Image (cartoon, coloured by chain):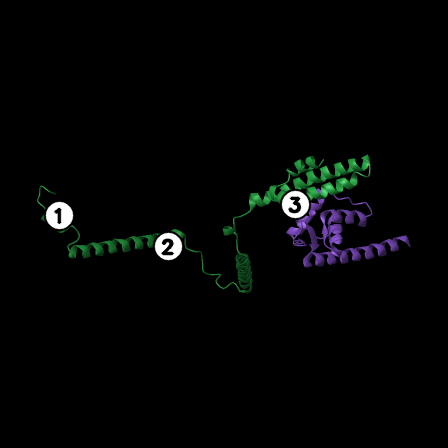
Chain colours: A purple, B green
Amino acid sequence: METLPLTEPVLLILLSLAGQPRHGYSILKDVEQMSEGRVLLSTGTLYGALRRLLDDDWIERLEEKDSSRGRQAYRLTARGRKNLRFEVSRLKHLTRLANLRVAVKEY
Amino acid sequence: MLKLYRCLLRFYPTAHRDNFGEEMAAVFSEVQAETAKRGWAARIRFCVRETTGLLLGAVQEHLREFPVRRFAMRAEFRFPKSTAVLMTIILAGVVLAIERGKAIQASLPDVNPHLGPIQPTQHTFLPIVGITLLFFYTAGLVGWAILFALRRSGVHRLAEMAPDQK
């Protein structure tokens, strides 16, 4: 079960799906690109996270008539998008607070 | 390499393998084809990452399934949510009643300080036992008298029997 706060790989997977539905390989590449090569997911890690997100109804498999079992696309559900927004606002608040504290320390 | 990957996939629980196995292998071969262009160091890093990720993922999936299989209750034995709510309400009621009782006890003055010692239990217990025994003995006697009057007690039949049959 995914709980807030999210781990970095899970957050990046959700951000990758926030823009458009994606297949597994596309998610891996997007996560690598977003993190500037810092987060390299293995297929085991990716599909473990996707399975949990599917179970929690944060993402769903896209029904494609011509898709083989080797290429399934995933997209965010309304619940997943809501939780992602919540997490992003939490991170914004944390960043703002951190900036304030660091600025105070510097003076 | 793909064959080895498929072998390692067998460490996953069957349900996960059925659901994601083909997809994982397809993504793996895509990443492998891309990594092949990058050189040996990238390939070795890729192999280590995939093997570690796959084995850790398999352990996590088994751990996730274990408590469900081990401790899951059968559907017919599950408490409905209303039971939990009712039990909570009853518990709250009992606690409230106890607290209310304590408050009443504390608010009342000592109304019967001169009642003297409470009688020992045996003083009331023995007469009750005696009365109960007497009641059942009398009831038995009345019952037997009724049967005797109705000639159902067996005494008359016994009297009518021949001496050698007794």
Do tag 3 and tag 1 residues touch (Cβ < 8 Å)?
A: no
Which of the 4 quarters of the picture holds residue A82? bottom right
- Residue B35 image position (x, y, % from top left): 79, 40
Q: Are marks 3 and 2 on the same chain?
A: yes
In percent of width and height, residue B86 lies at 53, 59
- Is residue A87 visible to us here? no
Q: Residue at point 63% right, 42% down?
A: B17
Q: Residue furthest right?
A: A107
Q: Which residue is mark 1?
A: B158
Query: Vertical placement of A89 versus B74: above or below?
Result: below
Classify residue B60 as left or right of residue B42: left
Q: Judge by depth and name the residue closer to the eye, A45 or B85.
A: A45
Badge 2 and badge 1 both on one subunit: yes
Circles 3 and 2, Cβ within 8 Å, touching? The answer is no
Under mark 2, the amino acid is Thr
Q: Earlier in the sequence, mark 3 or mark 2?
A: 3
Query: Which sits in the foreground, A105 or B16?
Result: B16
Within 10 angstroms of label 2, few (less than 14), some, or many (20 or more) residues? few
Look at discs 3 and 1 and give the one toward the viewer: 3
Q: Which callout, 2 or 1, points to the residue nearer the camera?
A: 1
Q: Which residue is mark 2?
A: B124
